[in-house]
Image (spheres, rainbow, N blue to C red):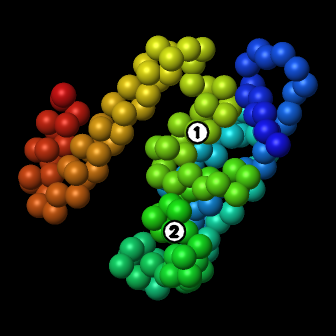
Amino acid sequence: EILAYVLPHTLCEGPLVAMPAMKLMYFDGRGLAETTRILLAAANKEYEDFRYPCTFGTPGDFSTLKRDEWQAARDSGELDSTMGMLPCIEIDGVRIGQSKAVERFAAKACGFMGANEVEAGLIDMLTCAIQDSKDAYNKVKAIKDEGEKKAAMDKYFAE
């Protein structure tokens, strides 16, 4: 049996079939899944927002982060299809991992990837540029020496 997926803003002939149930999986926080949550909310898409609990031994110290349920799921092989990584989104039993792939899937499913291939390419280009900028900022933010960090931040914001 072939299941037809009808995305918003798509013209088609024949009966409309609802989008299958989606389950977004991530940790109990915003992080890498937040863009996908925003896309799904903006399109009023129903989905299960599954969050693995995480706690800090020392608040704010990521070296003390505990994610026991996620670790158990990873160790059991439950997350093998996404290489043990989160976030991932599940549609009809198929899991898609990697945050940017999940975001692009959600954007397309919500009708936010443009009206044609060229618009989709331009949207993808902009999202890659934003990621490059975030990566460069995080690299500068990680500098330990305050003088070196200030100089690098000044350079970052000047460019």
Judging by the rendered image, the residue that carries numbered circle 1 is 105
Q: Amino acid at mark 1?
A: Phe
Query: Could you tell me which quadrant the C terminus lies in?
Result: top left
* Residue farthest front in this picture: 1
Residue at disc 2, secondary structure:
helix
Q: Position of residue 13 (x, y in %)?
A: 84, 16
First reached walking from the N terminus: tag 2 or tag 1: 2
Q: Nearer the viewer, mark 2 or mark 1?
A: 2
* Residue farthest right in this picture: 15
Residue in front for this viewpoint, 148 or 2: 2
For image coordinates 49% across by 44% down, the residue present is 101
Q: Is residue 29 visible?
A: no
Question: Can you tell which mark lies on residue 80?
Answer: 2
Q: Position of residue 131 (x, y in %)?
A: 36, 39
For image coordinates 36% across by 33% down, the residue present is 128
Residue at disc 1, secondary structure:
helix
Residue 108 placement, left or right of 83? right
Q: CA distance from mark 2 to mark 1?
A: 20 Å
